[in-house]
Image: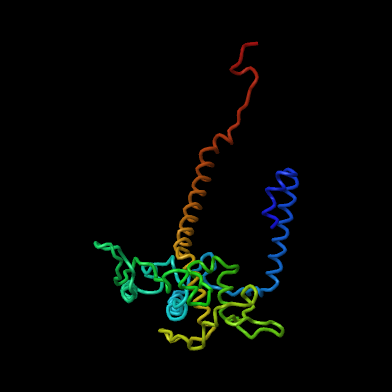
Amino acid sequence: MMASRLPTMFRKNGLPAAAAAFAAASAASASVTLLDEEDVVHAPHYPWRHQGYFSSFDHAALRRGYQVYREVCASCHSLHYIRFRELVGVTHTKEEVKQMAMDVDVLDGPNDQGEMFERPGKPYDVIPSPYPNKEAGRAANGGAYPPDLSLMVKARHNGADYVFALLTGYCDPPAGKEMMPGLHYNPYFPGGAISMPPPLNDGGVEYEDGTEATISQQARDIAQFLSWTAEPESEERKKNACKYMVVLAFMALSVGYYKRWKWAPLKTRQIAYVKGVGGAPH
């Protein structure tokens, strides 16, 4: 409302009035944001292994996290920015990834007749979405479109902490909190009302490695897997950073030594002027 009046105020009263109006609008939006944040429980911080400067992902947890995604989350949420081949060496072997890709049908084309066709997936294909478009996703979920999870950890404050807290934070609403039909109470979700029902259950998946599939274990694994999907190059970047730091340290020492070797004779020499030596005769 205030923002729509800024051009008119600028024409009538000049820059000072427009600046004051913009400041008022900014303050109003900031106050609304603060009010919204008061209705949210902030996720506590958890000790994630992969967040250290020299730490890597727990790849067993990543494999379990992908299993949770495939068996629980993939029915509603997509991973638009992850291809099957990126899982090679991270969660599965090359042969396993090829088989997983072949198990899904991918829409491709057009062919020579100009028609679209389905074919078995290949490792370079994107992990398929459960819905052909957003409208179909909203129609299947009561008007709420399940967001893509590829960058979810980067899109939310406290990332993996938020994902873990949200998945384990479903509970009964407090006294006086009325929930609309189809909504569920979760204090870590803005407003406390979320359309996604509790997705995890104890024993909801059967881990291949025999790990007990409690709700907290599944939430921990999927949070780590989504941390990887948000930054699949994280481990390679840390490895390269270590190499670059070693090279930079060696270069700094070499430059320092060369500088001292080159300039030491010049800095330590003494120039003396002796009266009557080499000068004009008296």
- The residue nearer to you, when weighing 165 against 172, is 172
- Which residue is situated farthest in the top direction here? 282
Q: Position of residue 148 (x, y in %)?
A: 49, 69
- How are the colours assigned in the image? rainbow
Residue 9, compared with residue 219, is above or below; it is: above
Residue 277, compared with residue 129, is above or below; it is: above
**Would residue 84 appear left or right of 169 to someone viewing this image?**
left
- Residue 124 lies in what quarter of the image? bottom left
**Would residue 122 appear left or right of 232 to someone viewing this image?**
left
- The residue nearer to you, when weighing 24 against 123, is 24
- Residue 37 lies in what quarter of the image? bottom right
Q: How many marks?
A: 0
- The residue nearer to you, when weighing 263 against 229, is 229
Q: Position of residue 106 (x, y in %)?
A: 33, 70
Is there any visible trace of residue 60 in the rendered image?
A: no
Residue drawn at (73%, 43%) of the image: 14
Image quadrant holding the N terminus, namely bottom right
- The residue nearer to you, when weighing 62 against 77, is 77
Image quadrant holding the C terminus, namely top right
Q: Position of residue 176 (x, y in %)?
A: 72, 83
Q: Position of residue 164 (x, y in %)?
A: 56, 77
**Would residue 215 appear left or right of 81 to someone viewing this image?**
right
Residue drawn at (68%, 54%) of the image: 3
Residue drawn at (58%, 36%) of the image: 267
Residue 100, compared with residue 33, is above or below; it is: below
- Which residue is situated farthest in the left direction here? 112
Is there any visible trace of residue 140 in the rendered image?
A: yes
- Residue 281 lies in what quarter of the image? top right
